[in-house]
Amino acid sequence: MVDDNPIQLSLLRHLFQRHGHLTIEARNGAEALIVLATEFPDVVVSDCVMPLLDGYQFCRLVKDDRATRHLPVLLLTAQGAGLARFWAKTCGADRFLVKGRDLDHVVEVAAALAAQSDKPRAAHAVPKLAQDNFGVEAIQHRLASALEQRLLETALRDSIARLYTAEHDTARLIQGFVEILQELVLPGALMVNYLGEDGVWCRGVHGSSVSEEDRLDLEKALQEQSCFHLSAGCQWHPASDDDERRRSLRDPTLRIYQATTPGYPVLGALGFITERRSADEFERLFEIAAEELGRLLSLEDSRLRLYHQAIRDPLTGLFNRKHILDMLAMELDQCGRFKQGLAIMLVDLDHFKAVNDRYGHPVGDQVLSVMAQRMSFGLRKVDQLGRIGGEEFLIYCPQTDMEGARAMAERLREDVILDSVPGLPAGDRVTLSIGLASWNGPEDSIEQLMSRSDKALYLAKAQGRNRVVG
């Protein structure tokens, strides 16, 4: 218990002892730091306003020291204003209470904090101030260092946060993160992996003092501790070869941090090889970097999910009507610029209403999904496919004339009927009617192009379906 008021300290002492707790007392933050050099309490209950070293400064020094950072701190104050609560949060206090008549609540909260804490002081760890003999100059130096540390943390958070406002490409976000953090790590190596929509991939940067074997060890450790298995090796990039990068590592250490955001699945991890002294000195910065990386990746993952929901048909996974037409409009603009050809296909599943009526809508949905997948497999990489409504689909084929489109459409029509569709009787096949149209130049609008293709599709149906017209 830390309080400069002897009456308040006496009240708290009797209260805690009445509940069966042993207490140690200090009259201000400086005296409390001396106590913590030799004592190992379960929790600290401190007043905020005290001479020499107040509760906020004391809490910040406790939380900045690796030896005591996991010690729970409960701050008490008679000032219930928002600013006092704000300072309590920024200095790292675990809880903040306004003093009232019911001091039993203080005991309850302190006991709860002690019960929740499962991280004891690191073995053989001695507080920094104990090493500096607790002089006034030492305390002032530690406070200045704590302030500098806060500025570094704020600058790091701000630099990483600005990445997301500047870029919305995952690879560039990760590259920007690596560039920011590499100054803390080099001449060692830094590696980030990310669980994206296309699987797990990673990016790393290394100094010349780190061998290929060291980098492989880092990859292996990152995979083991993050539970992400890379389908391919990490993309390593050498750092600039100035003098600092060429320094040898005297006492290297390997550290791994998971990039986590509360309430969100783990999407990535951060690993590095650097000097042990640097790893210890910048430990809090690395923890913050991992937190910010987790936030960065979760934001990017959410953005991509929302983007895909906006452009994809939820049943088939193909582009929806709006997006495929927007893409077609952009493709026509490119055709006008570079004098290239383009053809489109309007595709309709024959007698699909009968499938729904006879077998039910769940089977109909399965038929749509299977046929969409088969059409996707039958196209080139440059071709684009979207569902524009019901059982109707649109395909556009860049740099393709009418004859080329006709050959592709015939092959597509024949390929989709080779196998039966799950959910339908073995002998049943779902056939396609396809209407073709080709772009006639800059004077030809997307509406005219679609209209010609629609008329060709109508003609294919009128001639008996399961055919290509155009």
Image (cartoon, helix red, strand yellow):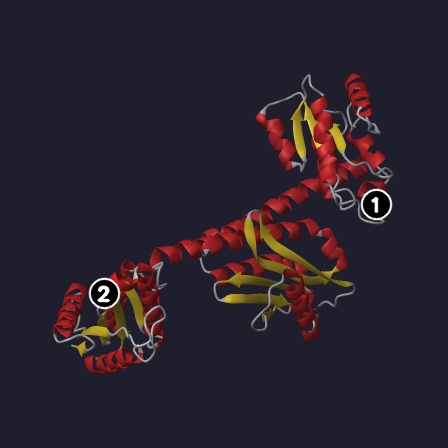
Q: Check disc 2: other Cα within 10 Å, few if <14, some if 14-19, many if 20+.
A: few
Q: Quadrant of the C terminus?
A: bottom left
Q: In x, y percent, where is residue 336?
A: 22, 71
Q: In x, y percent, where is residue 401?
A: 21, 80
Q: Front-most of 248 and 23? A: 23
Q: Label 1 belongs to which residue?
A: 126
Q: Check disc 1: other Cα within 10 Å, few if <14, some if 14-19, many if 20+.
A: some
Q: Front-most of 388 and 98? A: 388
Residue type beneath disc 1: Val
Mark 2–mark 1 Cα distance, whole angstroms, equals 79 Å
Q: Front-most of 409 and 192? A: 409
Q: Label 2 belongs to which residue?
A: 354
Residue 164: give its label.
none
Q: Earlier in the sequence, mark 2 or mark 1?
A: 1
Q: In x, y percent, where is residue 50?
A: 74, 25
Q: Front-most of 306 and 346? A: 346
Residue 389 visible in this rendered orientation of the protein:
no
Q: In x, y percent, where is residue 363?
A: 33, 63
SS of the residue at dot 1? Answer: loop
Foreground tag (2 vs 1):
2
Residue type beneath disc 2: Ala
Residue 56 in the figure: left or right of residue 426: right
Can you say whether 176 is above or below 82 in the image? below
Looking at the image, which residue is at 85% across and 49% down?
124
Q: In which quarter of the image is residue 25?
A: top right
